Every structure is written in structure tokens, then in C-alpha cells.
């Protein structure tokens, strides 16, 4: 009877510990913050006028500026744009140009590219989580490694007054190693006009290497202590029976 109780405690403890560790392994882990104007090294927002080195203008866009690194802009902003203070999680990115605020560029589609390294993560579990954006004039596509995960038609629209939520996108479109996320912004007026992009979101995915959580290890230790306590509680009764 004693041995059966001990076996039950050990089995139950190990089973529950395995369940907790497995649940921990399946939990999505942070890979990279892709918010514009965000410094992943310091976990702070970049200052006005500094380069956001995570982003670069990709080649192939009709608006040109290929290879340029966009700049963070907090002020002055065009009066109709979402205010910098509207969120503490991102800032506007612009290109150096003309106009009153110095952000006017020619018409065309501009590719804002960011690279995400999935080394150490399972690419099949990776996705962009909590994605939202504002753009001048309009975000026409989001692509991961060339595959569209969001598109909308190119008809004229202005998307710079508030954030638009896209939620979680891109599951199944990432691969091992380096991945390129592209935000395609259409500057739609025929002459020079303000161009800007503001993005918030993170890339998340399951880590390849799983590490048991402290709670799981504590549970295993608790199970071992329970077995020892059971044995000690049973010893006096065994002695009396022997006597």
C-alpha cells in the first residue's frame, strides 16, 4: 500500500511537471519589435531626426530613394498626421524632402523594409503580432519574404489621422535565418507631398530550445518532498506493527 501511494505521487508529479514544461515550450516568445522609431537595443524610442537603422527603402519602388535609411520625425509634423504623443510605442518615419515640414517627396510607391533574424526560433510558429499602422498616403501591402500578408487596392485614400489595426498576420510565411518584412506605402498625389509611415507590432514565435520554467522545477521538487514526507509519516506505524 505504501509503495503504491509513493508510485502514485511520483507519477502524478512527473506528469504535471511534463504538462507545465510542454505548455511553456508552446508559448510564443518575443523575437523582434518592428515598431518604427523603436531602438531594440535600449528598448526606447529614437530621438527626432535620428536614423532608424532597422529600416531601409528597398529597391523596385516607383518612388525611388532606394537604399536610403528613413528618419524619425516627432516635429514638425503635417497638421493632419497622427500626433507623436498618440502612442509611446512608435514614431513616424519620413524621408528628407521638401515642403514646410521637409518631408515632401515625389509620387510613387515606397518600400520600407526591415530584416528579422529567426535564428533559434521555429519559423513555422512565427508571425507579426499586434500589427497596426498609419501612413501618408496609404499602405497598399505588407509582404513577408515577397508574399503578401495584407493588401488593399490602390484607390486614393489618406491613412495618416489614426492607427488601423491589422492584428496578427504572416503565420507560415517566415523561414529560417533572415526574413524581410516590406511595407509598401503609396504616395498618391501627382506632385511632391508628405510621405510617412508609422508601424507598431512585434514578431513572435516559439523558441527551438526549450527551458523549463522555475515553477515547473519547483513542482518537481515539491513532489520529491511529498514522497519523503509520506515515508516519514508511515515509519512510526511500521515500528508499532513490528513491536
Image: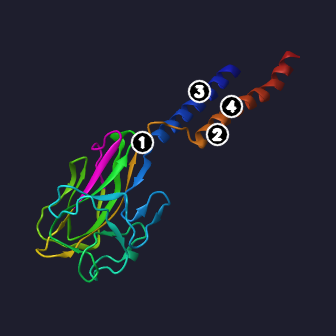
Q: Nearer the viewer, residue 206 or 141?
A: 141
Q: Is residue 19 left or right of residue 116?
A: right
Q: Position of residue 59 (x, y in %)?
A: 21, 55
Q: Which residues are magenta?
A: 168-184
Q: CA distance from mark 4 to mark 3?
A: 11 Å
Mark 4 or mark 2: which is in front? 2
Q: Looking at this rendering, what residue extends furthest in the right direction?
A: 243
Q: Is residue 172 left or right of residue 151?
A: right
242 versus 228 height, above or below = above
Residue to which mark 2 is pinned: 218
Q: Contact (CB < 8 A) between labels 3 and 2?
A: no
How crowded pointer 1 is (Cα within 10 Å; few <14, some 14-19, many 20+) is rated as many
Q: Is residue 68 left or right of residue 35?
A: left
Q: CA distance from mark 1 to mark 4?
A: 30 Å
How crowded pointer 3 is (Cα within 10 Å; few <14, some 14-19, many 20+) is rated as few
Task: Tell me which numbered mark, 3 or 2, is placed earlier along the sequence.
Answer: 3
Residue to which mark 3 is pinned: 11
**To which quarter of the image does residue 16 belong?**
top right
Task: Tell me which numbered mark, 4 or 3, is placed earlier along the sequence.
Answer: 3
Task: Tell me which numbered mark, 4 or 2, is placed earlier along the sequence.
Answer: 2
Q: Position of residue 112 (x, y in %)?
A: 27, 59
Mark 4 or mark 3: which is in front? 4
Q: CA distance from mark 3 to mark 2?
A: 16 Å
Mark 2: which secondary structure? helix
Is 101 magenta? The answer is no
Residue to which mark 1 is pinned: 206
Is 169 magenta? The answer is yes
Q: Contact (CB < 8 A) between labels 1 and 4?
A: no
Task: Tell me which numbered mark, 1 or 4, is placed earlier along the sequence.
Answer: 1
Amino acid at each position: 500500500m505504501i509503495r503504491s501511494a509513493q508510485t502514485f505521487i511520483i507519477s502524478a508529479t512527473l506528469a504535471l511537471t511534463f504538462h507545465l514544461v510542454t505548455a511553456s515550450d508552446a508559448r510564443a516568445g518575443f523575437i523582434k519589435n518592428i515598431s518604427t522609431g523603436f531602438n531594440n537595443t535600449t528598448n526606447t524610442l529614437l530621438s527626432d531626426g535620428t536614423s532608424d537603422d532597422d529600416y531601409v527603402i528597398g529597391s523596385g519602388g516607383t518612388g525611388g530613394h532606394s537604399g536610403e535609411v528613413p528618419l524619425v520625425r516627432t516635429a514638425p509634423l503635417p497638421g493632419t498626421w497622427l500626433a507623436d504623443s498618440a502612442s509611446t510605442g512608435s514614431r513616424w518615419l519620413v524621408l528628407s524632402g521638401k515642403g514646410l515640414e521637409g518631408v515632401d517627396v515625389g509620387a510613387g510607391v515606397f518600400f520600407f523594409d526591415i530584416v528579422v533574424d529567426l535564428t533559434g526560433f521555429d519559423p513555422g510558429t512565427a508571425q507579426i503580432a499586434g500589427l497596426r499602422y498609419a501612413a501618408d498616403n496609404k499602405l497598399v501591402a505588407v509582404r513577408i519574404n515577397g508574399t503578401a500578408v495584407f493588401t488593399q487596392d490602390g484607390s486614393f485614400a489618406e491613412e495618416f489621422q489614426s492607427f488601423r489595426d491589422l492584428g496578427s498576420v504572416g503565420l507560415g510565411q517566415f523561414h529560417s535565418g533572415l526574413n524581410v518584412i516590406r511595407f509598401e506605402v503609396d504616395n498618391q498625389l501627382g506632385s511632391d507631398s508628405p510621405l510617412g509611415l508609422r508601424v507598431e507590432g512585434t514578431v513572435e514565435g516559439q523558441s527551438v530550445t526549450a527551458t523549463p520554467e522555475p515553477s515547473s522545477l519547483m513542482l518537481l521538487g515539491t513532489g520529491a518532498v511529498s514522497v519523503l514526507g509520506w515515508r516519514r509519516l508511515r515509519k512510526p506505524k511500521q515500528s508499532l506493527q513490528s513491536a
